[in-house]
Image (cartoon, grey):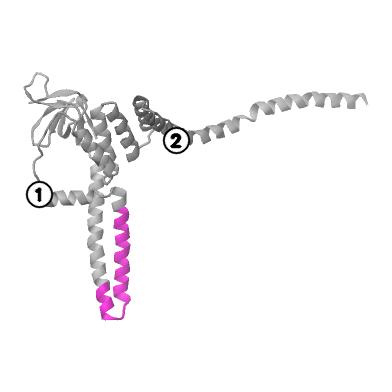
Amino acid sequence: MKKIILITLSLLCALPLAAQQGADTLPEAPAAEAAEAVAPATSLRLWDRANEAYVAGDFRTAADTYRLLLARGESSAKLYYNLGNACFKEERLGEAILCYRRALRLQPGNEDVRYNLGVAEARTKDTIERIPELGLATWVRSVRHLMGCTAWSLLSLGLLAAMFACGLFYLLSARLSLRKAGFCGMVAAAVLCLVATLFALGARREILDCSQAVVMASSVSVKSSPDRAATDLFVLHEGTAVEITDRLDDWCEIAIADGKRGWIEESKIETI
C-alpha cells in the first residue's frame, strides 16, 4: 500500500514539471509560423507607411521607405513612379528622372509616368536639341511603347494560336470561299505574330540595356579623355540623360542627344 502511495505522489509531482516543459517548447513552432505569416505583410505595411507619409507631405520619409522596399527586392513601375514623385517633391531632380525612366521601362505605355517625366525634364538646366530621325522610326518606337514586354509576348502567343486556328480552318473547310478566308487569316496572323514577337524582343532588350544613364551630380564637366587633367568639352547638369558608349576603369564615354561625346566619371552618373 505504501508503495502505491509513493508511486502516486511521484506521478503527481512529475506532472507539473512535464506541463512546464511542454509550455516551454510549444510556443516555438507557432512563433516560427507567426514569423512566416508576418514576413509577407511587412512589405505591405511599408508600402502603406510610405503612401501615408507622402499624403501627409513627409516626402523624405516616403522616399526612404520606397527605397527600403527596393532594397528588399521589390520592383514595379508603380513603386518607381511613387519614388520618383517623392524625389521630385524633395527637388532631387536626378533621382526623380532616373525613377521615372525605370518605371517607363517596365510600363512604357503609362501616360502618367511619361507626363511626369516630361515635367521633370523641363526643369533640367541643359537644353539639348535632339538629332532628327526618320518619321517611320519614331512611329515604330511609339507603337512599341504602347505595351510592355509581357503584354507583347502574350499578344504574340495569342496571334500564334490564331494562325494555327486559321490554318486548320483552311485545311478542313469544304467551300472555296472559306478556304480563302482561312488562308488570308493565317497569313495575317503570322505577320502580326512576327511583329509582336519583334516588339517583345525589343522591349526586353530595352529593359536589359545598361547603356542609358542619368547625370546625378549637380554639375559635371565632360572631358576629352578619361583623365581629370584632360580638357573640358562641355558641362552637364543633374537630370540629363546620356548614353554610355564605352568604359575605361572609373570613366565612361558618353554621348548626348545632339551627338556630342566625351568622358565622364562613372560615379557622376547612374545607369537606368
Q: Is residue 195 magenta?
A: no
Could you classify mark 1 by the number of other residues whose Cα lies within 10 Å: few (under 14), some (14-19), or many (20 or more)?
A: few
| Quadrant assignment for the N terminus | top right
Count how many numbered circles sit on residues in the image. Answer: 2
Q: Secondary structure at mark 1?
A: loop
| Quadrant assignment for the C terminus | top left
- Note whether residue 76 is visible: no
Residue 269 badge: none
**Name of the residue lying farthest toward the top:** 229
User: What residue appears at the point 87 percent right and 23 percent down from the top-left corner?
Assistant: 6
Say if 205 sits above or below 236 in the image: below
Label 1 sits on residue = 134
- Work out whether residue 126 or residue 89 is closer to the camera in this orientation and state it: 89
Instruction: Identify which amino acid the numbered label 2 is placed on.
Output: Leu
Q: Is residue 171 magenta?
A: yes
Instruction: Identify which amino acid the numbered label 1 is placed on.
Output: Leu
Task: Check whether the beta carbons of the residues at disc 1 and disc 2 lie within 8 A of each other.
Answer: no
Say if 135 sits above or below 74 in the image: below
Residue 153 located left or right of residue 262 = right
**Name of the residue lying farthest toward the front:** 56
- Work out whether residue 211 or residue 68 is closer to the camera in this orientation and state it: 68
Q: Which residues are magenta?
A: 153-181
Gap between marks 1 and 2 measured at Cα: 46 Å
Label 2 sits on residue = 44
Residue 62 located left or right of residue 262 = right
In the image, residue 87 lies at what x, y percent?
Answer: 29, 29
**Name of the residue lying farthest toward the bottom:** 175
Specify which label sits upstream in the sequence, 1 or 2: 2
Residue 149 located left or right of residue 227 = right
In the image, residue 66 lies at what x, y percent?
Answer: 36, 31
Q: In terms of image quadrants, where is residue 258? A: top left
- Note whether residue 229 is visible: yes
